[in-house]
Amino acid sequence: MIRFRKYSCLLFVLIQAFFCSQLFAQKTLIDVSADSTAILIGEQTVLHLSITTDNGREVLPLIPRDTLMRGVEVLMLSLPDTTHIDNDRIVIKQDILVTSFDSALYLLPPLKVIDGPDTIASNQIALKVSTIPVNTDNPEEFYDIKLVWKPPFVLADYYALIYGILFLLFLICVIGYVIQRLRNRKPLIPQKAPEPLLPPHEQAVKDLDELKLQKLWQQGRNKEYYTLLTDILRKYILDRFYINAQEMTSGEILASLYKTSDVESVYSNLKQVLQLSDLVKFAKLHPLPEENDLSLMNAYLFVNQTKIVEVISPEKEESKKEDEGGLTVNDDVK
């Protein structure tokens, strides 16, 4: 019986020691270190917080957001960085940027971590904040505040100002232009002055000259040649006789001009051009070179014989001579 009790006590001690070792191995650890424990007033140093705990275990660091203690200010907190280590453990690291503006020796309070029902505290660090050393031999020697440094010239810094000035100048020019156009009662957008219209016969002769230079029938393009030739004559008849020849057939055009006195002498010439043109365009006739030249010559003849001749009155003729004489005198002076 005594032996049984002895073995039971030994077994209980072994089991308790095993569980204690397991609890100690899984305990959350927190450690704090500093880049520098001695700084001058206004300088900064970084505190490194390291938390070692089990993977998947929820721990909550209690880090002040503004001050660690009176006289020590928190400037910035970095984001936590988690690293996996052996035995299914993790290390959570976080940096704390602090500074102080009062010279003293500070014993920083321990940082704490909530681990379930427990609160674990870190080690404490002493931070010494010193003032700027003063020359005791010359206590009255003081230096004035340094002037503000001027940044280097960078053109990109002035882009907004340059573009703003250019836009303002452009806006002033636009407003001045609009006011000037409105004051002179002119349209805001200048319009190109239309070219003066030529008399019908001059325009027809000009178009015939351009058709002649194209040399279409010489290239075997008979249909295109006669189409343009009759279009020129139809437009001339419209402008000269006010007959809508562009919407009429060749027979209708000839019928409309048959009893016109101005056309009697060249009626046959126009008839030759229109009839041959219809044969080329609709019957695919291939006229001889002589016929092509004759058609163009008859077109010239029809225009020149039916054109309206402007009669100049004696007064206009005298005024014209005076103008020409004045120009001649000026030319002689030059």
Image (spheres, helix red, strand yellow):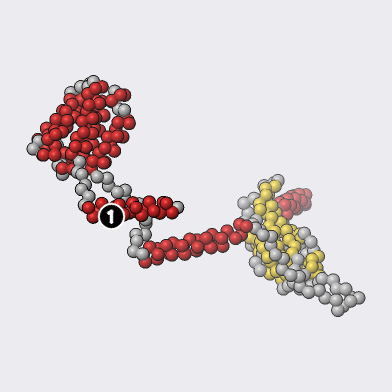
Q: Residue at x 19, y 35 (%)?
A: 302
Q: Nearer the viewer, residue 331 or 113?
A: 331
Task: Report which residue position mark 1 lands on.
Answer: 319
Q: Which residue appears farthest toward the bottom when viewing the image?
A: 140
From the top left corner, tell me how far across and down residue 277 is, in percent: 19, 28
From the top left corner, tell me how far across and down residue 248 is, in percent: 14, 37
Disc 1 marks which amino acid?
A: Ser
Q: Nearer the viewer, residue 70 or 213?
A: 213
- In this view of the protein, can residue 252 be seen by the observer? no
From the top left corner, tell me how far across and down residue 307 is, in percent: 20, 41
Apparent side of residue 183 relative to residue 11 in the rendered image (left or right): left
- In this view of the protein, can residue 325 be seen by the observer? yes
Q: Nearer the viewer, residue 173 or 2?
A: 173
Q: Which residue appears farthest toward the right when viewing the image?
A: 137
From the top left corner, tell me how far across and down residue 188 is, in percent: 37, 59
Dot 1, crowdedness within 10 Å: few (<14), some or many (≥20)? few
